[in-house]
Image (spheres, helix red, strand yellow):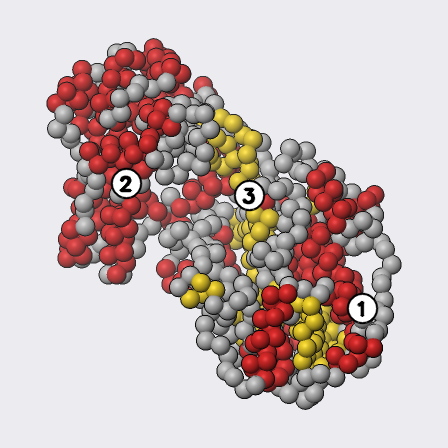
Amino acid sequence: MTPSDTATRSQVSAGIESTEDFADLLRRLNGIDMPPSRIVLESVRSLIASVGRPQVDEQSAIRRFYGLLNQKLRSNKKVINDIYARAAGHGYTFNYPQKRAIEWAVDTSNHSALAELLGSIVGSDEVVSQLLDLFDPVTVEQTRELLQGETADPTKLRKALDRSVQQDVVDATAGPLVWSLWRHEELYAYFGQPAAAPLADRPYLEMLARLNSKLFERNRSLVIRFVSPEVESGLRESQLQGLYDWVAGEWDVIDNHGYLALVIDASRNSWAGAWSICSDVILMAERFLERPIERGYFRWKDIRKQSLEHMPHLDDQAAQFDKGNEGFSYRDTFVLTDPNGRVAKLIALFQKNERDETLLPCPSCRSTDVEGNSYPVLGVKSWACNNLLCPERSIYNRGRRYDFRSLVRQSAIEDPANEIPVDNVRRWMRDVLEDEGSEEIMSTLIRHYSKQGDVVALIDAPVEVRNSLGRAVRVDLSIPKGEGGVFSKAAFFNRYLTTSAKVEGQAESGANSVLDERWSVIEGSSEQVLRKFPSDVFDRAITSPPYYNAKEYAQWPNLYCHLHDMRLVAEQVFRVLKPGSLYVYNVFDYFDNDKTIVFSAMGQRRVPLSALTVDLFRRVGFDFEGSSVWDKGDIEGKRGFNRGNFSPFYQAPFNCWEHVLLFRKPATASLDVPDKWRRVAEIRPVFKMVRGENRYGHTAPFPVELPRMFLEDLHADALILDPFGGSGTTARAALDKDMRCVLIERDPQYAELARELTAAHQAGASERLF
């Protein structure tokens, strides 16, 4: 990339001897008639005084400068994406280092470098020729126009306050020019800490490992434990306590940012026990560390105030809101099936993310002038570079943010030996798949959640790993133990389990008449309405409740308030169900901020609503019978992705299934769950959006096939309850089975929609077309 501006060429050739020379050159290159700010020029003056003037090849300096600007601006995004798409169409994909080299060749307009690179990767000259035909990078003039456009009409700046956007953009171009003129080893030594100067010529991660070797200890980076649930209740309780103690002990010995995988046998005799262990361990592992959090983001006083206003009968002293609950980060639960679609194994996956205060120099410029007061997610501390001459300041002159967890991921992605076979990545793209044996499970977990050189621990593995994949695989005979068994009595539960006496139902005559109707929709609060019904009258309850803060009609100040309200309804549902009857409860472990620690975006995580619900309903009195799996098919959104990388730590499956939790009101007779419910139910969700408009009328309806499936074992004329009626799906399913149904819905519009759809269905009309 060589501009036609001869004055620019001669200026570079003359070298940089003063800040005036630097400012003049920057103005010529970025095309903006404004000098850098005083503080930036002071930084340049100090650099020249310490390092001396640069000795640089003119053409390569200009090429690099515009390449760095194009990276910031993503100027060649379309060209690069077209190259990747065309290559993929011919069966060629690129790993991260290859993508980085391709993008740099395009951003620096280096056709020969791109041709050489593609020739070394792609085995077909014809395909290479087709890819090179797409090489059409922006020109110098176009880069300048994009840059100047950011000063007048910023594309990503949320708010400029009183700052000059033009000045920010100009200052942001100073770093790329510095790193285009001076040798990088000189700059690393100048900006970095004195101890790092002798390592200036080493890659960043190697330099960091030599300075802070403890950070890179990978002595227990992945732990895989296999569990076969005990059948007898007494043994199962003892087994669970043992797992709790193991999880607590594992926290102390596993590497930071390491992974924990629990593989649970869910075959026919273990199905209910597997789901019980899975939900209990998920709830415990995430929250077993109950302690004060000495961080400004812990908003416990606000959380306490919200909770007491919502739950006036809460025991404030027992709740101990000044203590936060932390632990492993819950990542996912994989469902593995046998050839007949029955659930065969569950894999619960966790990651340890513990706050680490070790100062990390900037990966781009190696400066230690950094701030460390931010957390991208809970438990992961990030740093922001304050060096005004860092090459990776944003286009609006904001310092690069980074964290050690990301650096670990980066170290894995840059080593080609860590690359995961494409067929393995594609097979495990969804979190519902067919089981192909324990050896494949272990090798996949090793590939996806550890890197070359890591130590992997196996506990109670049924088979050996025949290929260690470059890891040190160790069979653990001694299992770490901690104090995890006390979690069931943690203060956490006292933050939503009120101490007020339960309000029993007060049957009203009008309620009995409703029970005789084929179907009815009652407007009002479920808890209040259900109090009017007599006890032991419904044969089954089926519902999809309002998920915590997932929709506009279901908002709570925090998770504690949501769980409290769900408990009040569950108590009344328990009362009105006949002994032995089931409560079928559809819920999804989705991503949100539970607002039990922090209110900002850093609190976004996967909220295990299913595990919380299982514990809550047990405390109400229900027996947990297991979870039926609703596989919704390939999802439309991008809730799981790997950014196109086939390397460890980037593999996040698409979350394709939801829980249908099965709870039973205890009875004297022993009852069993139909075998069909142990199989994965493949049911497509309701398609309610047509050309961007919701034609259904409800934002979260579930398909009628789902409740219909959970009515097949009941007799005709059975009485069904849906305490969160929504659009009336359960009533229509009951009519299909010649059963009666009572819906309760607090939203008048949804109640009317339920009446409309159910009446049409009863009249023989087909489902409305949406």
Instruction: For mark 3, give the secondary structure.
Output: helix
Labels 3 and 1: the sequence-earlier one = 1
Three-letter residue code for mark 3: Ala
Labels 1 and 2: the sequence-earlier one = 2
Q: Looking at the picture, how far across and down is residue 422, in whole percent? A: 37, 59
Viewer-nearest of labels 1 and 2? 1
Query: In screen coordinates, is 207 left or right of 718?
Result: left
- 4 or 365: which is nearer to us? 4
Instruction: For mark 2, give the secondary structure.
Output: loop
Circle 2 residues within 10 Å: few <14, some 14–19, many ≥20: many
Task: Choose top left, top right, bottom left or bottom right for residue 673.
Answer: bottom right
Q: Which residue is mark 2?
A: 75
Three-letter residue code for mark 1: Arg
- Please tell me whether residue 690 is drawn above or below residue 62 in the rendered image: below
Viewer-nearest of labels 3 and 1? 1
Q: Which residue is mark 1?
A: 531
Q: Looking at the picture, how far across and down is residue 666, in whole percent? A: 79, 74
- Please tell me whether residue 543 is drawn above or below residue 244 in the rendered image: below
Residue occupying image coordinates x 40% and y 16%: 39
Circle 1 residues within 10 Å: few <14, some 14–19, many ≥20: many
